[in-house]
Image: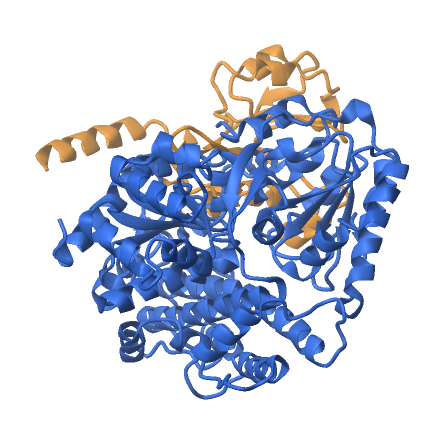
């Protein structure tokens, strides 16, 4: 399964990922100018925050034991066939149980539309918009099964040096 | 992060009665987090419409903009444009004063006059005007012509720079090709060479930036000289500083911005019995209380003893006291947010200059041909607003410190002349040689939201004073030291090292103050930084050395504006190692960073020291002072 890997040492806090996320979730034309011109501009689904030591995008992990799915009363939040946690717009009734359940604070309220908003991993795109747009490659798409092996190799390389 | 180290500011932030909707600069700073790293590093470029471009600082993404500009070129261009922006501000300020000067001579500005004929003649002699047997108006006319000629290109080195710095500096500038021949066309040249497809050599761009900084120095010096001639050269004056100077029973009017043209006239009319009577009739039993904010505040403090309420970063806080009836602004460093904060109170924000209006403020066009009447109308607006003041919203903190201000170069030389009338600089030089004064540090610049207000200033000055470094201050640095009580004779006893305290006491007593001079000398607003250069140039000339050999350093530990970048850069050109406490947007280029912090040392003597930690910065400056002392053969 491919997941979004955050290399915190590379994030410079430019928020391009937030902008790309909004564009990808625009109603019609997926351009910056169309997105900002929308009557209700799209909400972002990830958040670049300032921490003690650096800047980090905080992103939905699409957890295996997703608390937002468990706590969703209306059956709006579900896991799609690829394994990503998504929200059915028409079933969301705005009870915000998911917001309370999410330990990362990445499910938020669209107050005007009265629905919960979260990362859907851009199902219509080959690569999620935030990853594709990141200018420093702080966000990368990695295979969660091959990542440990890569890590082990890195460790060995470091020791050899 | 703590927002301020100023107790008065903290008191108002915690106790104001404006409600939750009052948002300050610190709230907006938090909302901006995190700030874009490309911008912080200076590697984004928006100079053409093929962009915006940015360089990946980690080397995996693009290493060039669309036009091919590297990080080095982009960073150098950004810095040069910042310096041009600062220079343009000082040019506008100086030209504005020159235009009023012209109207005085043609009789069109009857509320102004040439108040300081001594300074007029001194400046005239300095720039080569014959004064013997000539009338004041005659001299003034020639001086004005020379002043105005500085702005348009006259094809020869700028007079105000060439006549005020020692020859050594002029030679260095000439060798590097950084002698400007005009203030305004040098700004234009920077804009030209940094536009699409012109100068791409980072070092050549930086040389253009250094030249522009010399033009900025010229504009600053010109503005100071003309202001002194029109409003008087500052002499020591005792006043108070901090928000405690606002008075519950008076109409409080704050003057904020930079230029004395309007504020000085308001300061004058505010003592007119008729206006005071109007204020009393409106219910203000203590009449009118004019206070200053930012550098306009420094101008009227130095010349009229008007108390200084606060500095630029806390300008909104002055309104949040609920006791400010009008905030009158001219230009530079005025946050558009003041009009928004004022919506939660009765305060009227009045803009006065055609180039500086803001949504939510009332514009009262200032007409310099009818200055006093304009000033009276503005004061009357404050009186009207006083009637609307809500006593339940008033939150005036107790804090205020005594501040002795007004140390122009002339005032410093004057005080020294009381010790040795024949050779005023001798006591200063003798004490530098003897080590009683280990060195001199000029603190300049702003307050930034990135540092708890005044923290760097206060921490650095305590350490430097204890090590016998004499401190000069301008701009919001002088405000910081005034508000924190560093501009009193008591502060000399409390903070100055033994040698420095002895010198300041001797000079103070000789000057008839019956006490020590303060350990931090208030030299004026940010445009007044050349006053400090004048003192350094005189010392260098007297010793027969170059300014770059003197144990003199500068520091802008909480810098904000493009003006500060320009000033810091000309301090470096002047030969002074200059500390910055906030990292400027240049780190995206190793070449530019290296040039500014190291290479310039060999070329100019001056260079930048970037150090956010105030105690480490003080150590670095002390090391530089000692290195220079050793160079002069002093222990």
Residue lying at 87% horizontally and 34% vertically, measured from the top left: B388
Q: Count the marks.
A: 0
- Answer above or below: position of B380 versus B495: below
From the viewer's perspective, is B64 left or right of B121? left
- Answer above or below: position of B301 versus B7: below
Of B247 and B448, which appears nearest the observer? B247
Residue lying at 83% horizontally and 37% vertically, measured from the top left: B386
Q: How is the image coloured?
A: by chain
Percent position of residue B172, x then y: 27, 74
Of B117 and B496, which appears nearest the observer? B117
Q: Which chain is blue?
A: B
- Answer above or below: position of B174 versus B262: below
Of B249 and B170, which appears nearest the observer? B249
Of A38 and B4, which appears nearest the observer? B4
Please identify which colour was used for chain A in the image. Answer: orange
Question: Can the viewer see residue A135?
Answer: no
- The residue furthest bottom is B155
Displayed quadrant of residue B397: top right
Percent position of residue B526, x then y: 50, 55
- The residue furthest right is B281
């Amino acid at each position: 399964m491919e997941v979004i890997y955050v290399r915190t040492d590379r994030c410079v806090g430019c928020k391009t990922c937030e902008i790309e996320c909004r564009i990808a979730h625009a109603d019609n034309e997926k351009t910056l100018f169309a997105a900002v011109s929308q009557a209700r501009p799209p909400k972002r689904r990830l958040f670049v925050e300032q921490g003690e030591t650096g800047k980090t995008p905080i992103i939905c992990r699409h957890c295996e034991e997703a608390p937002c799915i468990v706590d969703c009363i209306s059956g709006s939040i579900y896991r799609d066939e690829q394994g990503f946690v998504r929200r059915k717009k028409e079933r969301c009734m705005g009870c915000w149980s998911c917001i309370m359940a999410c330990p990362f604070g990445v499910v938020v309220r669209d107050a005007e539309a009265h629905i919960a908003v979260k990362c859907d991993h851009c199902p219509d795109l080959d690569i999620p918009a935030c990853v594709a747009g990141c200018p420093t490659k702080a966000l990368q798409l990695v295979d969660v099964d091959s990542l440990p092996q890569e890590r082990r190799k890195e460790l060995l390389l470091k020791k050899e040096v | 992060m703590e927002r301020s180290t100023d107790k008065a500011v903290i008191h108002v932030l915690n106790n104001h009665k404006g409600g939750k909707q009052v948002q300050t600069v610190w709230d907006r700073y938090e909302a901006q987090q995190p700030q874009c790293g490309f911008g912080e590093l200076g590697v984004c470029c928006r100079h053409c419409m093929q962009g915006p471009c940015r360089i990946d600082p980690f080397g995996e993404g693009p290493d060039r903009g669309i036009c091919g500009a590297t990080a080095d070129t982009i960073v150098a261009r950004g810095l040069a444009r910042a310096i041009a922006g600062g220079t343009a501000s000082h040019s506008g300020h100086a030209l504005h004063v020159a235009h009023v000067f012209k109207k005085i001579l043609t009789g069109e500005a009857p509320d102004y006059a040439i108040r300081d004929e001594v300074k007029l003649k001194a400046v005239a002699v300095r720039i080569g005007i014959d004064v013997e047997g000539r009338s004041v108006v005659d001299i003034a006319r020639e001086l004005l012509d020379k002043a105005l000629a500085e702005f348009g290109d006259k094809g020869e080195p700028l007079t105000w720079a060439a006549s005020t710095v020692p020859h050594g500096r002029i030679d260095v500038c000439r060798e590097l090709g950084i002698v400007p021949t005009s203030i305004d066309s040098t700004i234009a040249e920077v804009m030209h060479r940094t536009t699409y497809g012109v100068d791409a050599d980072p070092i050549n761009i930086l040389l253009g930036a250094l030249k522009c900084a010399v033009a900025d120095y010229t504009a600053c010096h010109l503005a100071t000289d003309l202001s002194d001639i029109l409003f008087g050269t500052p002499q020591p004056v005792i006043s108070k500083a901090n928000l405690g100077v606002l008075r519950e029973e008076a109409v409080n009017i704050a003057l904020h911005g930079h230029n004395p043209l309007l504020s000085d006239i308001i300061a004058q009319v505010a003592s007119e019995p008729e206006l005071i009577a109007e204020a009393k009739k409106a219910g203000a039993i203590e009449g009118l209380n004019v206070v200053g904010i930012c550098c306009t505040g420094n101008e009227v403090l130095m010349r009229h003893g008007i108390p200084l309420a606060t500095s630029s970063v806390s300008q909104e806080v002055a309104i949040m006291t609920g006791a400010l009836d009008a905030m009158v602004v001219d230009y530079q460093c005025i946050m558009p947010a003041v009009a928004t904060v004022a919506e939660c109170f009765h305060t009227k924000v009045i803009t006065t200059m055609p180039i500086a209006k803001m949504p939510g403020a009332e514009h009262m066009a200032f007409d310099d041909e009818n200055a006093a009447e304009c000033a009276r109308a503005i004061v009357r607006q404050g009186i009207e607003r006083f009637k609307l003041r809500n006593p339940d919203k008033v939150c005036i903190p107790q804090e205020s410190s005594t501040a002795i201000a007004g140390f122009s170069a002339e005032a410093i030389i004057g005080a020294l002349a009381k010790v040795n009338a024949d050779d005023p600089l001798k006591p200063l030089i003798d004490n530098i040689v003897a080590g009683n004064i280990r060195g001199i540090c000029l603190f300049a610049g702003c307050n930034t939201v990135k540092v708890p207000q005044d923290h760097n200033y206060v921490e650095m000055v305590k350490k430097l004073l204890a090590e016998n470094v004499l401190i000069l201050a301008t701009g919001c640095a002088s405000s910081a030291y005034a508000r924190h009580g560093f501009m009193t004779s008591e502060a000399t006893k409390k903070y100055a090292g033994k040698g420095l305290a002895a010198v300041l006491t001797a000079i103070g007593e000789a000057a008839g103050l019956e006490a020590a001079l303060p350990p931090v000398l208030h030299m004026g607003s940010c445009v007044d930084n050349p006053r400090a250069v004048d003192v350094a140039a005189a010392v260098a000339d007297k010793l027969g050395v170059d300014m770059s050999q003197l144990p003199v350093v500068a520091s802008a530990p909480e810098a904000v504006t493009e003006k500060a970048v320009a000033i810091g850069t000309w301090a470096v050109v002047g030969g002074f190692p200059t500390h910055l406490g906030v990292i400027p947007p240049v780190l995206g280029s190793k070449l530019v960073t290296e040039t500014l912090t190291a290479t310039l040392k060999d070329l100019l003597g001056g260079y930048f020291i970037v150090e956010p930690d105030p105690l480490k910065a003080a150590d670095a400056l002390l090391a530089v002072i000692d290195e220079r002392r050793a160079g002069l053969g002093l222990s």
